[in-house]
Amino acid sequence: MTSMRMLTLAMTFSGLVLAGCAATPPTRFYTLMPMTQLQAAKPAVAAKKVTVNITPVEIPDYLDRLQIVTRDGGNELKLADLDRWAGSLAGNIAVVLAENLSLLLGSEQVIAYPRVQTASPDYTVAVRVLQLDCIPGDQVQLKAQWTLLADAERKESVTRMAAYTEKLDDRQYASVVAAVSRTLAQLSRDIAREIDSHSAGKQ
């Protein structure tokens, strides 16, 4: 094989490799977003600023991955090729809940694990995500069970189970993530109302 032919083949191969790389779209990363001050619409504030610890959020095993998981409306799950969570989904949910509750309760002492938590909090919140179905072009449905433990001794508790739904007008992953954030806002409001109600009863 002549040197010229070898050079031609090498250049052709390099061109194909570069073309393949150029055609590969970049991976997109997403995070859930907390409520804004305007969305929080300040509720009745308790006599004192409550302290709240949020324990590690539990999520189903099939969601515990970087790829965003969607459902086709039936039993089949789909893992996104290029659309991923920027970190731990469970950790992101806990942080968003903490920020939402901080706004809703008017307290800066709402802390999510693994940050150093209050030694004797007024309330401890435990959240377990039972179902998070993201169906592009249709809806996002969050089903969660949460327990509110009152006082440092955790002698008083209430457990609730609720489902929240947000409609989707398109199939974009950005829209899916935004809808998940809105379902967490609904969950946060329910938890905040329970804390407000319990705090008012103690006055």
Image (cartoon, helix red, strand yellow):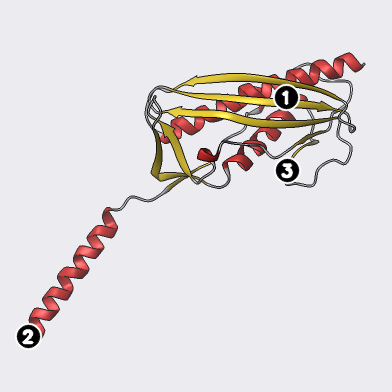
First reached walking from the N terminus: tag 2 or tag 3: 2
Residue closer to the observer: 37 or 9: 9
Task: Answer with mark 3 or mark 1, whichever residue precedes in sequence.
Answer: 1
Amino acid tagged 2: Thr
Residue 161 sits above or below residue 27 on the image? above
Q: Between marks 2 and 3, how big is the CA–CA gap?
A: 66 Å
Question: Is disc 1 in contact with disc 2, using a CB cutoff of under 8 Å?
Answer: no
Q: Which residue is mark 2?
A: 2
Q: Position of residue 119 (x, y in %)?
A: 88, 41
> Neighbour class for label 3 at 10 Å: few (<14), some, many (≥20)?
some
Mark toward the viewer: 2 or 3 = 3
**Secondary structure under the numbered disc 2 in the rendered image:** loop
Residue 141: x and y, percent? 51, 23
* Residue that numbered label 1 is attached to: 104
**Which residue is under mark 3?**
113
Quarter in which the N terminus is drawn = bottom left
Residue 155's label in the rendered image is none
Measure the C-alpha gap from mark 3 to mark 1.
19 Å
